[in-house]
Amino acid sequence: MRGIRPGVLGALPATMPAVLVLAVIGAVPAAADPIPNVQLGFHNGYCSTTEVSVPANTPFTVDIDTTWQFNDRSEFRIPSLQIRVFLPSTYFNPHARVEVGPQPAGDVPFELMTQWVSGSAGKGCWGTIRVL
């Protein structure tokens, strides 16, 4: 018997399997939005900025450039979130990345601190991450 197909697909019209395949192909998930990233510079004991903004309820990263930071005892801290990261000096890879989980709307204070040593110009700074 020509034109008769066994099974479930055989009970469908001849064009229906092709429609099902196209429906499955068209259901590709959307790409995830990139994680927000804020940039901070910490150079010779001073901050390049002390206020940055990120969206609420979304994880984000903080990239810190420590070029011209010659002290290897510098730290990035967010005390309210118990985040404390030692920063590399300019002698090594002068960049650090800190991942922060989703935060509700509000202000999140941060600190970029360093020990004063001969030749250091500043001791650090305090700033705010505004979660909007």
Image (spheres, rainbow, N blue to C red):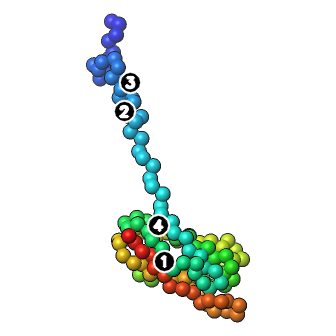
Among numbered discs 3 and 2, the one appearing first in the sequence: 3
Q: Position of residue 10 (x, y in %)?
A: 31, 18
Q: Residue at x 41, y 45 (%)?
A: 29
**Mark 1 vs mark 3: which is more N-terminal?**
3
Mark 1 and mark 2: Cα distance apart in space: 47 Å
Is the residue under label 3 in contact with that under label 1 (CB below 8 Å)? no
In the structure shown, which secondary structural element does the residue marked by tag 4 occupy? Answer: strand
Residue 99 x, y percent position in the rendering = 49, 69
Residue 100 visible at all? yes
Q: CA distance from mark 3 to mark 2?
A: 9 Å
How busy is the neighbourhood of tag 1: few (under 14 within 10 Å), some, or many (20 plus)? some
Residue 50 location (% of width, % of height): 51, 80
Give the amino acid type for the residue marked by disc 4 in the picture. Phe
Q: Nearer the viewer, mark 1 or mark 3?
A: 1
Q: Which residue is mark 1?
A: 51
Disc 3 residue type? Ala
Displayed quadrant of residue 11: top left
**How far is disc 3 from disc 4 in space, using C-alphas?**
43 Å
Considering only order in the chain, which callout, 1 or 4, is on the residue closer to the N terminus?
1
Q: Which mark is residue 18?
A: 3
